[in-house]
């Protein structure tokens, strides 16, 4: 069952802010990205390794550097504590499943280490769909 999106956003913010790995090397982790979960969209703004804002269902023209689009089912599988094969990360899911990565891939690659550490926090917080 999906959790309340506002509660999820706060849990994800707290998990990011308290993660020792992210906080140890994310000083320059600054970008805006979108998680499109089919039933819900989540805009996340990172500034200097800290969550500046999490917006649930941002307006359609809200700017972001890159976005990840997938079905709600894919997001649920990727957020399991032990994801099934091809749901362990964005690259496998984008090749074998329905995840699409769009936008400025250079910004994603510049922040990949930090983004990956943060993305893996979904295994702790789950997803709001």
Image (cartoon, helix red, strand yellow):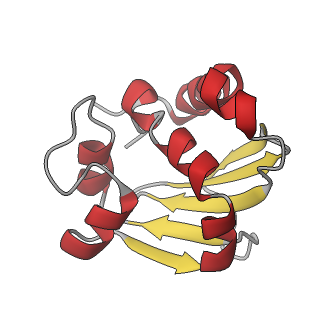
The outermost residue toward the left is 85
* Left or right placement of residue 79 versus residue 85 in this view: right
Q: Closer to the camera, 74 or 58?
A: 74
Q: In this view, does 117 lie above or below 97?
A: above
Q: In which quarter of the image is the N terminus?
A: top left
Which residue corresponds to the image point at 19% horizontal and 71% vertical from the top-left?
96
Query: Residue 104, percent across and down?
Result: 65, 80
* Left or right placement of residue 89 versus residue 95 in this view: right
* Left or right placement of residue 26 versus residue 125 in this view: right
Q: In this view, does 30 lie above or below 120?
A: below
Which image quarter: residue 129? top left
Which residue corresponds to the image point at 45% horizontal and 27% vertical from the top-left?
125
Query: Residue 17, percent across and down?
Result: 71, 25
User: Residue 127: in sight, yes or no?
Assistant: yes
Which image quarter: residue 63? bottom right
Query: Residue 26, percent across and down?
Result: 75, 41
Q: Closer to the camera, 58 or 29?
A: 29
User: Residue 19: in sight, yes or no?
Assistant: no
């Amino acid at each position: 069952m999906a959790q309340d999106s506002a509660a999820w956003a706060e849990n994800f913010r707290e998990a990011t802010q308290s993660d020792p790995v992210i906080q140890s090397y994310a000083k320059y982790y600054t970008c805006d990205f979108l998680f499109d979960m089919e039933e819900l969209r989540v805009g996340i703004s990172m500034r200097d390794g800290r969550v500046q804002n999490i917006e649930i269902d941002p307006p359609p023209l809200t700017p972001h550097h890159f976005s990840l689009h997938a079905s709600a089912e894919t997001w649920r599988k990727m957020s399991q504590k032990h994801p099934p094969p091809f749901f362990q990360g964005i690259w496998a899911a984008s090749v074998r499943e329905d995840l699409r990565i769009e936008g400025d891939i250079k910004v994603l690659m510049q922040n990949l280490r930090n983004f990956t550490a943060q993305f893996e926090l979904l295994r702790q917080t789950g997803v709001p769909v």
